[in-house]
Amino acid sequence: MTPGQSSPERRAQHGLRSVVLRAGDFFGGGSGSWLDLVIVKSLRSGKLVYPGPADVPHAWAYLPDLARAFVALAERADLPAASRFHFAGSTLTGAQLLAGLERAAVSLGIAPARGFRRGRVPWGLLRAGGLAVPMWRAIAEMAYLWRVPHALDGAALRGAVGALPATPIDAALREALVALGFGDRGDAPACAGQRACLSSD
């Protein structure tokens, strides 16, 4: 612990209540996430770029769903003075995420004649560039999160606020693309041609 900092528990001793809600990588609701800055940056040209191995599970949080969780916690006045929760969100392998994005893109009229191409993040270049660019160095330091399988357990959150609405992942990915300017909500249904959307549970 560095000087001037304190844990939520220590702050609670001085009467300051706090709630920590941890979540996976954000997407949806606009720009500024891995989704638009990297993964679908070249979507219009038919290319998707994934930062990690395609078979490793990774935690994601659809921002509109996460916002509902924040509101639900804020409305609880009886929580412990220092509380920590996890937002389960969606846990997907790279292959599952890219397949869902391809379905969403097709439903919005983005369908490359030769199919979608897939690329990888040049981590080696980022590490080398990080010697001169602090932001690149900070990004490269988080690369392990794409190699190590992980998920968040939302049981404590459910116990505190009950079951919250969870947007099916196909619908969430489609809405995220729409928010980034790919098509509009009046296009084909998110699961057109599919028997069922993947659940975010």
Image (spheres, rainbow, N blue to C red):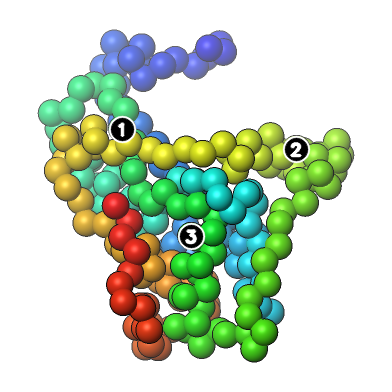
Task: Work out whether 97 lies above or below 4.
Answer: below
Q: Tell me if I can see residue 41 in this picture.
A: no
Amino acid type of the residue that numbered disc 2 sits on in the rendered structure: Arg
Q: At which x and y percent is residue 49?
A: 66, 62
Q: In this orientation, which residue lies closer to the viewer: 176 or 13?
A: 176
Q: What residue do we see at 63% from left, 36% from top?
A: 144
Q: Which of the marked residues, 2 or 3, is nearer the chain's N terminus?
A: 3
Relative side of 120 to 147, left or right: right
Distance between the Cα atoms at labels 1 and 2? 29 Å
Q: Secondary structure at mark 3?
A: helix
Amino acid type of the residue that numbered disc 3 sits on in the rendered structure: Gln
Numbered disc total: 3
Amino acid type of the residue that numbered disc 1 sits on in the rendered structure: Phe
- Mark 1, residue position: 85
Q: At which x and y percent is residue 195?
A: 31, 77
Task: Work out whether 1 lies above or below 156.
Answer: above
The answer to whether marks 1 and 2 mark residues whose Cβ atoms lie closer than 8 Å is no
Q: What residue do we see at 20% from left, 45% from top?
A: 72
Q: What residue do we see at 36% from left, 49% from top?
A: 89
Looking at the rendered structure, which numbered label has been put on residue 137? Answer: 2
Picture quadrant of residue 146: top right
Q: Secondary structure at mark 2?
A: helix
- Mark 3, residue position: 96
Task: Work out whether 184 lies above or below 131.
Answer: below
Q: What residue do we see at 63% from left, 85% from top?
A: 112
Q: Tell me if I can see residue 102 in this picture.
A: yes
